[in-house]
């Protein structure tokens, strides 16, 4: 059982269930029996662990939440819906799990995110690129914008 995130009650009832993320998860709207507040839960198939190889050689477990927050941060104050961001995260995670058995480089993930952001919103793309590529001066920033213009 899941606890209510507001009052920690163990009992809640399901108001609505929907398949989402192309059938890979179920979204449930719930109502707490005690405080009557509503919240959303997601049920996903437990996936095999996927490790991300960082630039320094360290390995850490793949985090869907970390991917979501990076893309959300890049799209902040831009006309990009949460639905579009969630769809992008689901697509990237799906491709990673389909194409990489146990380990994937953070560079590959970063390039996948950049490709999606380039299609979604150019400003979000440049924001993400500035952090991901660690621009050290104005020239590298200008070079990325010029490449974007050419494409």
Image (cartoon, helix red, strand yellow):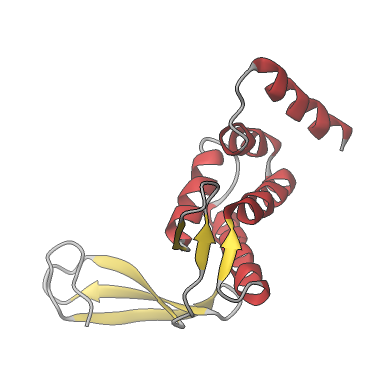
Which quadrant of the rendered structure holds the C terminus?
A: top right
> In the image, is residue 67 above or below residue 37?
above
User: In terms of depth relative to the viewer, which is nearer, 94 or 22?
Assistant: 94
User: In terms of depth relative to the viewer, which is nearer, 22 or 60?
Assistant: 60
The quarter holding residue 27 reads bottom left
Percent from the top left, x then y, of residue 66?
45, 54
Horizontally, residue 81 falls left or right of residue 64, namely: right
Horizontally, residue 107 falls left or right of residue 76, namely: right
Residue pictured at 63% horizontal, 35% vertical: 133
Residue pictured at 52% horizontal, 35% vertical: 77
Percent from the top left, x then y, of residue 139?
71, 17
The quarter holding residue 141 reads top right
Q: Which residue appears farthest toward the top when viewing the image?
A: 138
Horizontally, residue 16 falls left or right of residue 111, namely: left
Q: Which residue appears farthest toward the right when viewing the image?
A: 150
What is the tally of numbered marks visible in this picture?
0
> In the image, is residue 104 above or below residue 72?
below
Residue pictured at 55% horizontal, 40% vertical: 74
Percent from the top left, x then y, of residue 148?
80, 34
The quarter holding residue 32 reads bottom left
Percent from the top left, x then y, of residue 33?
15, 77
> In the image, is residue 48 above or below residue 149?
below
Which quadrant of the rendered structure holds the N terminus?
A: bottom left
Residue pictured at 67% horizontal, 46% vertical: 114
């Amino acid at each position: 059982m899941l606890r209510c995130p507001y009052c920690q009650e163990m009992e809640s009832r399901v108001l609505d269930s929907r398949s989402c993320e192309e059938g890979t998860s179920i979204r449930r709207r719930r109502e707490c029996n005690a405080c009557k507040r509503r919240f959303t839960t997601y049920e996903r198939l437990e996936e095999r662990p996927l490790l991300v190889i960082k630039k320094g050689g360290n390995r850490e477990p793949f985090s869907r939440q970390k991917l979501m927050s990076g893309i959300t941060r890049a799209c902040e104050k831009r006309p990009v819906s949460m639905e579009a961001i969630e769809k992008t995260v689901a697509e990237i995670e799906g491709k990673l799990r389909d194409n990489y058995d146990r380990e994937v480089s953070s560079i590959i993930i970063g390039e996948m995110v950049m490709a999606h952001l380039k299609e979604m919103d150019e400003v979000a793309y440049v924001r993400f690129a500035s952090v991901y590529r660690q621009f050290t001066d104005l020239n590298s920033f200008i070079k990325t914008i010029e490449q974007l213009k050419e494409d």
